[in-house]
Image (cartoon, helix red, strand yellow):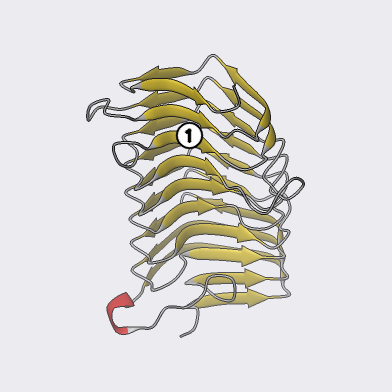
Amino acid sequence: MFPLLSGEAVTNVFVENLALDGNKTNNEELDGNYAGFVFMQDCATVEIRKVVARDYRGDGISWHICHDVTVEECESRNHTGLGLHPGSGSQRPVMRGNTIVGCHIGLFFCWGVKYALAEKNTIEDTKTAGISVGHRDTDNLIRGNTVKQSGQAGIVFRPECGPGFTGDRNTVEGNTVIDTGGEASAAVDVQGTTVGLVFRKNQLMETRGAAKRVGFRLGKDTKDITLDGNTTEGFATKVDDKRK
C-alpha cells in the first residue's frame, strides 16, 4: 500500500530507465488521487523517461499539483487504475511517445489540467476510455495518438457538474481511434455542457461491423464544437449530433 517511487515538494528531478513490477493480485487497491506506482505531488520540472511500470493495483504514473512534468517513452501496463494520471491543477504536462495497455483508463486528465500536450501515445485495451478529459481541463492539445480497443469510448469528454466545470477549449488533432466499445458505442463521446472543442484531421475506424456504432457523439447541451477534415469508416452513424 505505497508507491514504489514517489516524490513530494521536489524540483528538477529526472527519472529514467527503470522497470517497476507490481503485485496487484496480492495487494489492495490504492487510490490514484493519493498515491500510485509512480507518484509525484507538489513538484516542478520533473522528467520521467523510459520507465516501465506494470501490474499495479492502482494508477501507473500519477502526479498532482505538479507543473512542467514530462512523461516520455514510458510503458504503463496492466494496472487496475489509470495509465497516466495528470491532476489537481497540474500545468503544462507533456506526455509523449508512451505506451499504455490494459489499464482501467489510459490517459486521464483529472482536475484543472491546463496547457498540456499529449502526443504520439499508443493506448490499447482499456476497460473504459482510452483518453478521458473533464473537470476544468482546458486549453490542452491532444495530437497524433493511437487509441485501440477501448472498452467504452476512445476519447471522452466527461459531463462533470455543469457549465464552467467541463473540459473546454481543447484541440484534438490527427488522432487514430480504432474499434471502440460495444455495439452502440461512440469512438468520440462529448458529454455534458462541454464547449469550444476542435476536432481536426482525426481518423475514426470500426472494423468489427457497423451495428449501432457512432463516430462522433455530441451531447445535446454541448456547444461550439468544430469538426474539420476528420474521416470516419465503418460506423452506422458518422456524427450523432444530439443538439439538433
Kind of element beneath mark 1: strand
The residue under the point 61% across, 53% down is: 70
Residue placed most toward the observer, 143 or 126: 126
The quarter of the picture where residue 115 lies is top right
The residue under the point 48% across, 34% down is: 188
Is residue 98 visible in the rendered image? The answer is: no
Is residue 232 visible in the rendered image? The answer is: yes
The amino acid beneath tag 1 is Val
Query: Outermost residue toward the front?
Result: 244
Q: Residue 179, how many percent across, how many down? A: 31, 35
Residue 226 sits above or below residue 218 on the image: above
Query: Outermost residue toward the top?
Result: 229
From the viewer's perspective, is 125 left or right of 197?
left
Q: Residue 217, how many percent across, how many down? A: 49, 31
From the viewer's perspective, is 207 left or right of 151?
left
The residue under the point 53% across, 70% down is: 32
Residue 148 sits above or below residue 99 on the image: above
For disc 1, the neighbor class at 10 Å (few under 14, some 14 to 19, many from 20) is many
The residue labelled by disc 1 is 188
Residue placed most toward the observer, 135 or 99: 135
Residue 243 sits above or below residue 179 on the image: above
